[in-house]
Image (cartoon, helix red, strand yellow):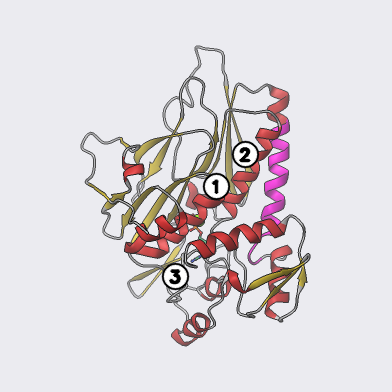
């Protein structure tokens, strides 16, 4: 749910815009949702089906954006107000699986991906379209929220009613909403009988099938800008990146970014970006955030989440990848950067 400016990153690589001398079989459509652009690439789809897909997906994602917004009044702010007051709250049928999925991923990540820390994110001033607060919050306020240990495991359902055992829980689905939304869009395309497509929300994406006679191919952005490498993505897979550069401010010579380590209450340290190839968007989105928070210890968290294809770039710009990612990276530069290969630890 970030601004378009933060999402210029990953460009689709060659071929997508070509094909002038053959009957056009790739349709590219752009819709504006989530406060950003979502690009749909549809292979071999007729006009009427494409128009229907766009309409349905625009409706779904627009709806999700309003209902899940972390600070503009909607379903999530209503739920948060009740949880903060220690009251149980009625939750729409469609919201329950979302919270349950978020809870499962949070637990598996050791609560490094922790959508219950909305208060911390707000305290740091990131619940605003353009962060107004340019100074870090007082240490006591941060420490108090960390000591309250809000986590997804504090939530319990009683029928359709949701209750938190911990009034410090404030839901912020920002680290996972885009992944969940991309999954919904992919599901809609499947319902319409579309077999070959890509849904790309500013570089975070998932594909179906193939692009004609080859796999979909996408670029991975370098933190400093530009493209670092390309990867081919198989049917159903997703690629999500979490980067500290997406939203940040600087104060007294220190940069403070929007991905908060729930253990310290401060912006996560150690890595500047993590790219994950996952089975679905929700998993890859949550995992990219969790690994960014894990910092140098990311391989253990990747193992716990069952994610095998990871590229991590540390604060000094050094690249590390799991074998499952390294095998797939196609560097674009003639002299590719040094890449440390990091096997995932045994459990
Ligand atoms: P990006 O794609 O911008 O790198 P992420 O998917 O990592 O973003 O999501 C970051 C957003 O998630 C933050 O803006 C905030 O709303 C929320 N958030 C921050 N820290 C955490 C965390 N540890 N766990 C879950 N959500 C977080
Ligand atoms: Mg994420």
Quarter of the rendering containing residue 166: bottom right
- Cβ of mark 3 under 8 Å from ligand 1: the answer is yes
Which stretch appears magenta?
A: 52-71
**Marked residue nearer the N-terminal end (1 or 2):** 2
Which secondary structure dominates the residues rendered in magenta?
helix
Disc 2 is placed on an element classified as: helix
| Residue plotted at (46% across, 73% down) | 134
From what the image shows, is residue 259 above or below residue 322?
below
Is 250 magenta? The answer is no
Contact, CB < 8 Å: mark 1 with mark 2?
Answer: yes
Residue 74 seen in this snapshot: no
Q: Say which label, 2 or 3, has the lower sequence index.
A: 2
Percent from the top left, x then y, of residue 345?
33, 56
Q: Quadrant of residue 32?
A: top right
The disc at residue 186 is 2
Quick check: can you spot residue 46? Answer: yes
From the viewer's perspective, is 83 left or right of 216? right
> For the point 61% across and 44% down, which residue is it?
183
CA separation in Å, label 2 and label 3: 31 Å
Q: Position of residue 60 (x, y in %)?
A: 71, 46
Mark 3, residue position = 261
**Label 3 crowding class (10 Å Cα cut-off): few <14, some 14-19, many 20+?**
many
Q: Where is mark 1, residue-wise?
A: 281
Q: Is residue 240 left or right of residue 77?
A: left
Tell me if residue 231 comes above or below residue 320 in the rendering.
above
Is 59 included in the stretch rendered in magenta?
Answer: yes
- Position in image of residue 195 (x %, y %): 61, 28
**C-beta proximity under 8 Å, tags 2 and 3:** no
């Amino acid at each position: 749910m970030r601004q378009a400016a933060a999402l210029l990153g990953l460009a689709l690589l060659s071929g997508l815009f070509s094909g002038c001398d053959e009957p056009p079989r790739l349709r590219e459509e752009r819709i504006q949702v989530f406060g950003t652009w979502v690009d749909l690439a549809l292979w071999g789809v007729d006009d009427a089906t494409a128009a229907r897909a766009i309409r349905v997906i625009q409706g779904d994602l627009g709806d999700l954006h309003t209902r899940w917004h972390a600070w503009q009044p909607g379903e999530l702010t209503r739920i948060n107000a009740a949880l903060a007051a220690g009251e149980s709250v009625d939750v729409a049928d469609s919201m329950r699986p979302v919270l349950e999925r978020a809870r499962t991923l949070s637990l598996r990540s050791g609560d490094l991906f922790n959508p219950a820390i909305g208060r911390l994110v707000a305290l740091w001033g990131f619940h605003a379209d353009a962060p107004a607060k340019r100074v870090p919050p007082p240490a006591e306020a941060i420490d108090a929220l960390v000591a309250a240990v809000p986590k997804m495991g504090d939530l319990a359902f009683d029928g359709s009613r949701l209750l938190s055992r911990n009034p410090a829980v404030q839901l912020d689905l920002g680290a996972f909403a885009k992944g969940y939304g991309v999954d919904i869009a992919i599901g809609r395309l499947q319902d319409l009988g579309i077999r070959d497509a890509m849904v790309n929300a500013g570089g975070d994406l998932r594909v179906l099938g193939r692009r004609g006679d080859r796999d979909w191919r996408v670029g991975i952005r370098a933190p400093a800008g530009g493209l670092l490498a390309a990867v081919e993505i198989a049917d159903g897979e997703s690629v999500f990146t979490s980067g500290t550069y997406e939203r940040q401010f600087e104060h007294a010579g220190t940069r403070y970014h929007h991905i908060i380590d729930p253990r310290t209450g401060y912006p996560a340290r150690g890595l500047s970006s993590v790219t994950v190839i996952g089975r679905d968007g929700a998993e890859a989105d949550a995992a990219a955030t969790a690994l960014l928070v894990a910092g140098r210890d990311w391989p253990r968290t990747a193992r716990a989440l069952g994610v095998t294809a990871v590229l991590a770039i540390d604060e000094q710009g050094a690249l590390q990848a799991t074998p499952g990612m390294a095998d797939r990276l196609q560097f674009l530069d003639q002299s590719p950067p040094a890449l440390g290969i990091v096997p995932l630890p045994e459990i």
